[in-house]
Image: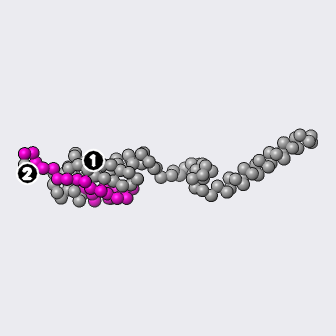
Amino acid sequence: MKPISAHRLAFGGIVIALSINAWAQGGDPTSAPAASVLAASGASAPATGKKADRALRRKVYAAIGKNKEIKAGSISVTAKDGAVTLSGSVPDNNQIPKVAEIARGVPGVTSVTSKLVVQKPFGGQ
């Protein structure tokens, strides 16, 4: 074997050994090797950020809309990291706790803040 080929082979072996060692020491679940293993296994990390907030908001709207007793046309839902805020108005005082309870039942909701008010009739007190 030529001396240059032997040096290249030895250098390549060292690079591979160091790469394997660095790969095995990843430890941090957010490191690139762990992330690529997670992606390769087909599992997905929980969604975070604006995309997750929008998805949670849609789930809460859908849950409220399924309840036929609730007049949800004037209800606004905002979500931020699992915290849901309900705003707007409902026609009856009894609907306020019902809407909050429905929102709490949605998977992913960690807290609910209700800023709902009772809608006053037109021209009434």
The answer to whether residue 52 shows anywhere in this view is yes
The residue at 17%/57% (across/down) is 93
The residue at 60%/56% (across/down) is 28
Residue 116 lies in the magenta stretch: yes
- Where is residue 79? Give x, y as percent: 35, 50
Numbered marks: total: 2
Labelled disc at residue 125? 2
- Where is residue 95? Give x, y as percent: 20, 56
Question: How many residues crowd mark 2 within 10 Å: few (<14), some (14–19), many (20+)?
Answer: few
Question: How many residues crowd mark 1 within 10 Å: few (<14), some (14–19), many (20+)?
Answer: some
Q: Quarter of the image containing the N terminus?
A: top right
The residue at 25%/54% (across/down) is 115
Q: Give the residues drawn in magenta, as a range.
A: 99-123
Labelled disc at residue 35? none
- Whether tag 1 and tag 2 are in contact, CB under 8 A, the answer is no
Q: Disc 1 marks which residue?
A: 76
Residue 101 vs 14, above or below: the answer is below
